Amino acid sequence: MATDEIDLEERGEAVLPAAPAPPRRRRGDHVSSAAQTVVAIAVVLTLCYVAKLVVITLMVSILLAFLLQPVVEMLERLRMPRSLASFLAVVFLLGIAYGGTHFSYNRAVDFVQQWPKYSVRVRQVVTSFRERTLTIQKTTERVLAQEPERGVVTVQQKVDWAEVLTRSAASVWEFVLIVSFIPFLVYFMLSWQDHVKSATVMLFRLENRNAAYKTLSRISAMTRSFIVGNLLIGLFMAAISVIVFALVDLSYPFILGFLSGFLSLVPYLGVVLAVVPPLVAGLGELSGGKLLVVVVTVLILHLFAINVLYPKILGRRLQLNPLVVTIALLVWGWIWGGMGLILAVPITGAMKIIFDHVETLRPYGAWMGE
């Protein structure tokens, strides 16, 4: 090595020093980075819990905006300004919501009015269950009365119904006020989509803007695929349910079939929620064999959707393993309740896409994948 350096110096060529080795991250740096990640996750989850109404409203508005995006694009092809196309899309959404609510309300009122005609068996079942409950309660009270505890004073607290109603009314008013923002949020998200997307990309450094653009595009495609896929699966299961319910002579097969089909989309709890409406409606008018057909139909449709339709339609877009989906449902269901179960999958899918495009977070994205 020394001889080579002497030869280079004699030739008049410069001797370049060896490149320094990249600095190794110390163990303390890894611990500090992990601690910062944990603190950041805790802060985000706390904010989601404290401001859940606001965050849920934003998430629902984003999903609706993705759902209406094809409608806006179709209207733009007709030489219509984007602002007008977005306005018509929101009006179309409100019209569908109003029509569905009006139809469901009328059917529900008609269903309640017709209920006494075939509710004898339902009352018998409810009465039998109530009698058993009262028997257990009386037995328990009798046993406790035989073994009184000395020095124990039982105080029965009266319920202040005025306070309860006031709190309920305040909660309902707050919910209505927050939900009323959804049409406006959807409109501005649609009309200002290009500006918001480009402005979001410009928030990153120049070398990271390409990755940010690809990430946003993949999240948009995943979210749109998730919404359309769930809509198609729900329509398929609703159509099969309507046909089966009509064949077994179940009253109101249309409304019960659509209700059961779309309730089945709720993760984990869907099969229970989907079987309750037709089962309750059929207790007063169907025989045991027909009720069994209804229950078996709901179970088969749910299993077919989970094991066949979901992997075929949504599997390529989401690419989440079952463990991550289960953890996501547990966490978001605990934070947001029923809406958390609905929003858990798209939120987790968006997180995986972000992890896949950030170099330091790619191991987490790989762990979340299939």
Image (spheres, grey):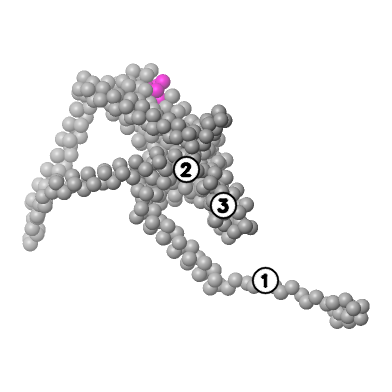
Instruction: Tell me the amino acid under the disc marked 1.
Output: Pro
Q: Residue at x 21, y 48 (%)?
A: 167
Q: Position of residue 261 (x, y in %)?
A: 40, 30
Q: Quadrant of residue 256?
A: top left
Instruction: Tell me the amino acid under the disc marked 3.
Output: Val
Q: Position of residue 205 (x, y in %)?
A: 59, 59
- SS at mark 1 in the image: loop
80, 277: nearer the viewer = 80
Instruction: Tell us which disc is closer to us: 1 or 3.
Output: 3
Name the residue tied to disc 1. Answer: 22
Please rate how many residues cluster around mark 1, counting C-alpha atoms within 10 Å: few if below 14, some from 14 to 19, many from 20: few
Q: Position of residue 86 (x, y in %)?
A: 47, 36
Report whether 243 appears left or right of 20: left
Q: Residue at x 20, y 31 (%)?
A: 126
Name the residue tied to disc 3. Answer: 201
- SS at mark 2 in the image: helix
Report whether 107 appears left or right of 35: left
Q: Main secondary structure of the magenta part?
A: helix
Q: Position of residue 129 (x, y in %)?
A: 20, 34
Whole-number angstrom distance, CA of label 2 to CA of label 3: 16 Å
Report whether 146 appears left or right of 23: left
